[in-house]
Image (cartoon, helix red, strand yellow):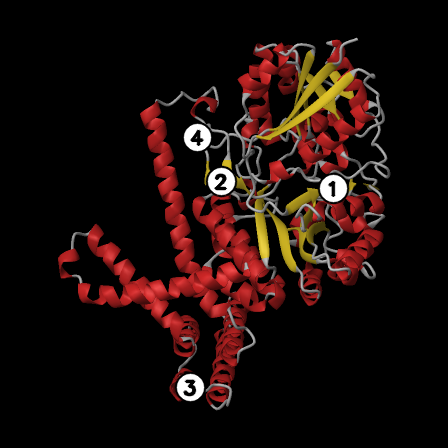
Amino acid sequence: MKQRTLQVVYILCSTYDDEGYPLRFHRGILPSNTLNCLRSLTLEVAGTGALGPDIEVEVSIYDDTVQRIPVQRIARLLRRKNADLLVGLVGVQSNQFVRATNLASQFRALGVPVVVGGFHVSGMLAMFDEVTPDLQRLLDMGVSLFQGEAEAPGALAGLLRDALAGELKPIYRQAEFPVLTHAGAPEPDLEYLKHFKSSSMGTIDTSRGCPFGCSFCSVINVQGRRLRSRSAECILKSIRASYTKGIDMWFFTDDNLSRSPVWEELFDGLAAMRESGMDITFMMQVDTRAYAIPGFVQKARRAGCYMVFVGMESVNPKNIEAMDKRQNDVDDYAHMVEVWHEAEALVHVGYIIGLPDDTRASVRRDIETLMNVVKVDEASFFMLTPAAGSADHKHMVEKGIPMDADLNNFDSLHETFRHPRMAPGEWTAAYKDAWETFYSKENLVNVLLRAPRVRYWQMLWIGMWYRYATLEGSHPMFTGILKRRERKARRPIFPRESIPRFLWRCVRETFWTFRTYAQIFLEFQEIWMLTRKPDDPKWATLAELRTKWVRLQDRLRDSDLKGRYDVAAQEIRNTLASSAERLQQLSESSRIRSRRVRKRLRKQAEEVNQYLHSFEVQRPTWRTIADAERYVAESLVKRYEELAISYVAKRRKFNAYRREVLGRFHSWRFLTLNVFAVPRLLVAEFLLGVRFMFSFLTHA
């Protein structure tokens, strides 16, 4: 009997952007764990002989977010002699479902058998008794649906046998959650990783499921409340093998690794690898109470944890209660962050905008709390979205609450239902406010000054990337180095653009992307100058002054101080007095070698004392309080930055000149421009840029 070949093609779908093009990038950020898992599992099933002795299986993987999907070329595999073909659109979430449906229709039109699986399919089939219209459309096209996990006993083997027989079932249901103890951990595909910014980073899920019951989450209904884990032995084996191929950084994609039954064995194994000379680091997702598990933080540190992603969601207790996230204690957040910082780990939180108690004003206050009281290093903001498979989604469907009919918008970046306390558009504005406030220059400076020193360059890179995404209006987790367009892949409801118009779009977008990169490069020179030596007395004093400034802002915005001008005035007096004393001490420090700098600091201390004296003799009013707050920000903190750190003054001088030049050209007043300053400033700009670039490239 001739040998038959089954060609299995797994595709991770992208989503369509607001212009109707697949969201695709040159060099993505996070590789998919799903593709690696299915590729390894399919080859493992074929190797067991479950498909028959004369069946050879070849597996290809495509990631729509970083690769063009060659539909015609894949379909031609059908015409190979003794070859069969199956296309799997995998890991499909709600916002990817429209793209998956369009790809499925293209493949079906060419006679290619298609199966679709992922959180949207599994969530909708798990939560509703009847097949929903969106899934029925796929069934009507002859597409098969796969609910559940491919590791379920016999599930993938049965699907592949049906594909070989040409008898795919409409729906494949896995009623039970599979035991993962003996499921092998896949090794990253090096060819696939070349499409990403860091080709030395792998992703792996060591466990699935979550014991908590958050109403917005689909994990508990798709993967279960009981946490199931791969064995620590197979995870460590995969990590060890991958290390020999250059993979030394990992993202454990478990929804909550801290509740995995093998976390301790896993951490001990990683620590042993590091002690043997293998420089392995990782980030993981945990809950807010993970730090309280005995030994968890300490073992994570020894194992190489450099960042934890924490599902904080909100700092508003009413919102925490509304989404049934009972494990979160708002009053404990700041302590949690301190504990992780002591273990030299950065804290990245997931934060939801649009919870029931949110308003645009309350979101603004809550973000200030997140930055200045809780003091997290990084935040990813999402708009509340009724995800398929979540209790929230089922409740809204059953109650007949209107939702956006376009699943493509269910990406946590769009308004998908009417918020009870925010008008249409106001919710989006609050979401954008959160990004712009948290990733402002002022907050990034504060974050870098207090971040664990060994994580400084990692945090600087993260800050640059998230600031870039904020300026671009994209989400940092759903973006890449440079957008890639495919003219013919535009969403069918949009008209196809002519070649000239399409090329002009690409040129315009590329120009704005590089313009944004240039802006980031200039902004972060100053941020780097203000944060690069936190242990030096000058920078340590800057950190103190900024801390006092932030504390003063928080106190003056405290609702308890409204109308109590005498109390607010005392807060300002305390800030000015302690700041003047600190400046005087620094001016007398032997560690400040420059006489000029010491003289300037002494003079600034005298000026602060003079202002304090004049403030004390005034009757406190709203205006005097506001003027004093402005003085602290501009004449105390910002002036100190320029006096103590000379590079900052040069950077800001050039920034001011550049703004003047642009302003004059826009208003056609460039003939009176002082062009004699240009050569000197350009030389200074070049030297500052080279110095920053050299430091960044040698450390990042």
Disc 1 versus disc 4: nearer the observer: 1
Tell which of 415 and 511 is nearer to you. 511
Task: Tell me which residue sits at (55%, 29%) in the image.
Answer: 408
Q: Amino acid at mark 4?
A: Glu
Q: Label 3 neighbourhood size at 10 Å, few (<14), some (14-19), many (20+)?
A: few
Disc 2 versus disc 1: nearer the observer: 1
Confirm whether residue 162 shows in the render: yes
Q: Are marks 2 and 4 in contact (CB under 8 Å)?
A: no
Judged left or right of residue 689, residue 589 is right
Q: Amino acid at mark 2?
A: Ala
The residue indicated by pointer 4 is 19
Mark 3 → mark 2, Cα distance in angstroms: 57 Å
Kind of element beneath mark 2: loop
Task: Tell me which residue sits at (44%, 48%) in the image.
Answer: 471
Q: Label 1 neighbourhood size at 10 Å, few (<14), some (14-19), many (20+)?
A: many
Indicate which disc, 1 or 4, sits on the residue closer to the N terminus.
4
Q: Amino acid at mark 1?
A: Asp
Q: Are marks 4 and 3 in contact (CB under 8 Å)?
A: no
Q: Amino acid at mark 3?
A: Ser
Kind of element beneath mark 1: loop
